[in-house]
């Protein structure tokens, strides 16, 4: 059915002016409200205010704008049902064929930490009502909730003056998903407020968890293995910190499921060391979601080389994340090793030229990674699914503040050793448990991960470090249950250890460290990663 009238009411104004101009050029009448109408009128687009269309002014400070029979009747009316058409004629209702709405920024209001009453005012009522009405009547009406769909809808209208039924059905599903996620976010937030205010749960977790809205970004060739199907969804909106869903791929093969897992792990690990243009460059090499080399240096080239050389065997086929733009020299160095992907704030022309022959190498640009962690506002919680349930926890955002650490051995770490311990502590939180990291001041030299006992992780880290274990700092993600881990570290030549403490055998472990002249600190924090 041809589109003759569209209603536009959006909080996110991106792309709406161009879309409205395209609709107007087709002779489609435009209805709008508030800020959207003001923007269109200011830019010379002919638009009718909804209050003029309905004959009813906005009420209650803008709380009531579109909740009117002439709006919802025009949206919900079935064009092929005589009784609906008779009702419309009797009530003076005109059809509305296209509804373009996105909702008040509730999640953003929560993220900003606005007062309760201000967050409540960011709960949209009229918007979801119009979206649901239009989605219910998708047989006759198209509904658009995402600016990413403007181009598709406009192209179809330009071809045949209508939106194809298959597109309307897709938009229908997206619209109901959008309002469901919006309502779930509101319900989750309100439940959390009650839990905190009435101390129903010390944790402050709600009875029903907040469910983010996700949007399909990419259908993947397969999952972890070829017999598994997979897809990549990005959260809406994206958080105000760098994520893989924000990255722009500028070269290489399509990202795989495993690339995305490894890339996310590399990104999270390198973000620990991202301090903007004036800070040290940092590099992380990841294999199977575990860091195998991490380094900081004065230049991105030196940082990458140090991270790669920390474990060159494991680096083969890995994914690299860098905190600084890739220059020509670093591009040439990256080209020396087979890699799956490189994530960086940007790639200079010389770097792209050096990496051009590596046609399969995936290059991902993520400008916000170069801004530095001080400018980000990390998401406070993370979700993990298990069969039949969902696990929700606060994210492990602990840094490496040595002011809270306790020296428990006769010998205290030197200043240089303390620097190395802090570096190892930032790395070990990103390594799968049981995790051991051997490091010097700004570079790892051996990482032992994923073992079912801690002493084996120490031995693996020491074996990978070789002679570089001499004088190294050791970070352990959890306490040593027995002295054997410290004995193995001493045999390798480790000089100092950072571990949480808390074992019933702490005194035996401390005695072993003292016996070998190892300085040891208890951090008080554990960094299990399962």
Image (cartoon, rainbow, N blue to C red):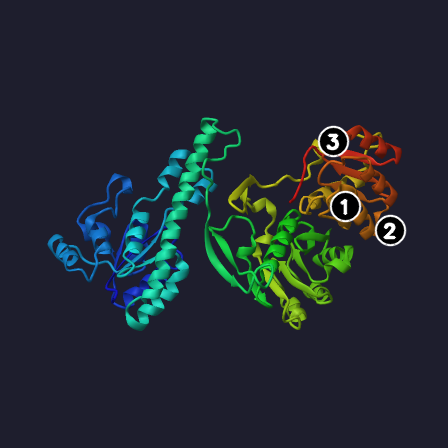
Question: Could you tell me which residue is drawn at 32 percent across and 67 percent down?
Answer: 164
CA–CA distance in space, label 1 to label 2: 17 Å
Could you tell me which residue is drawn at 15 percent across and 55 percent down? 88
Look at discs 1 and 2 and give the one toward the viewer: 1
Q: Which residue is mark 1?
A: 457
Q: Residue furthest top?
A: 198
Note whether 91 is above or below 512 in the view shown. below
391 on left or right of 45: right
Mark 1 or mark 2: which comes first in sequence? 1
Do the numbered discs 2 and 3 sit on residues whose CB atoms are within 8 Å? no
- Examine the rendered structure and indicate whether residue 199 appears above or below residue 287: above
Q: Which residue corresponds to mark 3?
A: 503
Identify which residue, 529 or 238, lies in the foreground: 529
Q: Quadrant of residue 473?
A: top right
Mark 3 / mark 1, whichever is N-terminal: 1
Q: Position of residue 68 (x, y in %)?
A: 21, 47
- Position in image of residue 212 (x %, y %): 46, 47
- The answer to whether residue 528 of the structure is visible from this angle is yes
The residue tagged 2 is 467
| Image coordinates for residue 264, horizontal then vertical, percent | 60, 53
Front residue of 341 and 492: 492
Mark 2 burial class by Cα count in 10 Å: few <14, some 14-19, many 20+: few
State whether residue 8 appears in this view. Answer: no
Q: Secondary structure at mark 1?
A: helix
Estimate the spatial distance between the alpha carbons at disc 3 and disc 1, rounded to whole Å.
Answer: 18 Å
């Amino acid at each position: 059915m041809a589109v003759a009238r569209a209603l536009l009411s959006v909080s996110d104004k991106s792309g709406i002016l161009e879309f409205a101009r395209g609709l107007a050029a087709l002779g489609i009448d435009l209805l709008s409200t508030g800020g959207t109408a003001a923007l269109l009128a200011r830019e010379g687009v002919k638009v009718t205010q909804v209050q003029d269309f309905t004959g009813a002014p906005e009420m209650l400070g803008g709380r009531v704008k579109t909740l009117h029979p002439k709006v919802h009747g025009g949206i919900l009316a079935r064009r092929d049902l005589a009784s609906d058409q008779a009702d419309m004629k009797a009530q003076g209702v005109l059809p509305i064929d296209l509804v373009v709405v996105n909702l008040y920024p509730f999640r953003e209001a929560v993220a900003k930490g606005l007062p309760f009453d201000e967050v409540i005012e960011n709960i949209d009522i009229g918007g979801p009502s119009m979206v649901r009405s239009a989605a219910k009547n998708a047989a006759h009406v198209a509904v658009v909730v995402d600016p990413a769909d403007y181009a598709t809808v406009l192209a179809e209208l330009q071809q045949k003056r209508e939106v194809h039924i298959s597109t309307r059905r897709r938009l229908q599903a997206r619209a109901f998903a959008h309002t469901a996620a919006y309502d779930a976010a509101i319900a989750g937030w309100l439940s959390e407020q009650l839990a905190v205010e009435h101390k129903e749960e010390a944790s402050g977790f709600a009875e029903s968890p907040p469910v983010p809205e996700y949007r399909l970004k990419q259908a993947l060739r397969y999952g972890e293995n070829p017999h598994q199907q997979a897809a990549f969804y990005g959260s809406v909106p994206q958080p105000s910190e760098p994520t893989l869903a924000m990255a722009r791929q500028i070269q290489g093969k399509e990202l795989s499921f495993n690339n995305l897992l490894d890339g996310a792990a590399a990104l999270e690990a390198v973000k620990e060391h991202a301090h903007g243009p004036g800070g040290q460059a940092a590099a992380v090499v990841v294999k199977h979601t575990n860091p195998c080399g991490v380094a900081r240096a004065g230049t991105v080239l030196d940082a990458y080389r140090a991270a790669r050389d920390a474990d060159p065997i494991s680096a083969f086929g890995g994914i690299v994340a860098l905190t600084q733009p890739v220059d020509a020299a670093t591009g040439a160095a990256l080209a020396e090793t087979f890699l799956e992907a490189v994530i960086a704030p940007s790639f200079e022309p010389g770097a792209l030229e050096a990496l051009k022959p590596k046609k399969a190498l995936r290059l991902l640009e993520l400008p916000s990674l170069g801004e530095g962690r001080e400018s980000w506002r990390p998401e406070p919680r993370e979700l993990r699914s298990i069969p039949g349930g969902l696990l929700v926890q606060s994210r492990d955002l602990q840094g490496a503040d040595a002011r809270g650490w306790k020296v428990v051995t006769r010998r205290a770490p030197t200043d240089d050793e303390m620097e190395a311990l802090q570096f190892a502590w930032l790395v070990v939180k990103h390594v799968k448990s049981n995790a051991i990291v051997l490091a010097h001041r700004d570079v790892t030299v051996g990482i032992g991960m994923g073992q079912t006992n801690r002493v084996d992780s120490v031995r693996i880290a020491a074996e990978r470090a070789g002679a570089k274990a001499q004088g190294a700092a050791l970070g352990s993600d959890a306490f040593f249950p027995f002295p054997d881990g410290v004995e193995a570290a001493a045999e390798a030549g480790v000089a100092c250890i950072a571990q949480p403490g808390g074992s019933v055998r702490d005194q035996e472990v401390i005695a072993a460290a003292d016996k070998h002249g190892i300085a040891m600190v208890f951090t008080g924090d554990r960094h299990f990663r399962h």
